[in-house]
Amino acid sequence: MRIGVLGSGIVAQTLAAGFLKHGYETTIGTREPSKLADWKAANPKALVGSFSEAAAFGEVVVLAVKGTAAIEALRLAGSAHLSGKVVIDSCNPIADAPPDHGVLKFFTTLDQSLMEQLQREFADARFVDRTSVA
């Protein structure tokens, strides 16, 4: 199976390395390929490309970006590259605000999760969260 990972942070790098370790062909998508030079050197079987290239490559797509960047990352991946595919959402909807008395703020509401927002915009993709596939 071919896996496309969207993101270049530590979560995306760890997940992509895990897929590689278990024999999956993996492409990691990023806006800044140079950011992954060291990771690529340590994972020579992986491919590094754009969000669009990773989404097109993957039979399954893993969304591993900061929650506030999720919709933009999927837009860069392209609706056509997500259509009909399972998209595993590993994002947290943490707001770009400091904690209030040690409590993180979310940018979502109790009435609408991040995944619901993503599913509405990318209706032809099949979103699942990371706990659904464990």
Image (tube, rainbow, N blue to C red):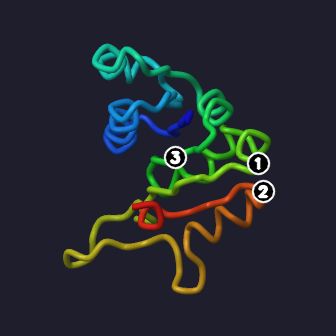
Sequence-wise, the earlier of marks 2 and 3 is 3
Mark 3: few/some/many CA within 10 Å (<14, 14-19, 20+): many
Mark 1 or mark 3: name the one nearer the start of the chain: 3
What percent of the width, then of the height, locates residue 103? 26, 76
Give SS at disc 3.
strand
**How far separated are the C-alphas under marks 1 and 3?**
14 Å
Residue where numbered disc 2 is placed: 124
Kind of residue at badge 1: Ser
Q: Residue at x 63, y 30 (%)?
A: 57
Residue at the (52%, 85%) spot, across then down: 110
Q: Are marks 2 and 1 in contact (CB under 8 Å)?
A: yes
Mark 1 highlights which residue?
83
Q: Amino acid at mark 3?
A: Val
17 vs 63, left or right, is left
Q: Which residue occupies the extreme bottom position in the image?
A: 111
Asked which quadrant contains residue 79, the reply is top right
Please state which amino acid type lies under the numbered disc 2.
Asp
Residue 26, position as x, y percentages in the image: 49, 29
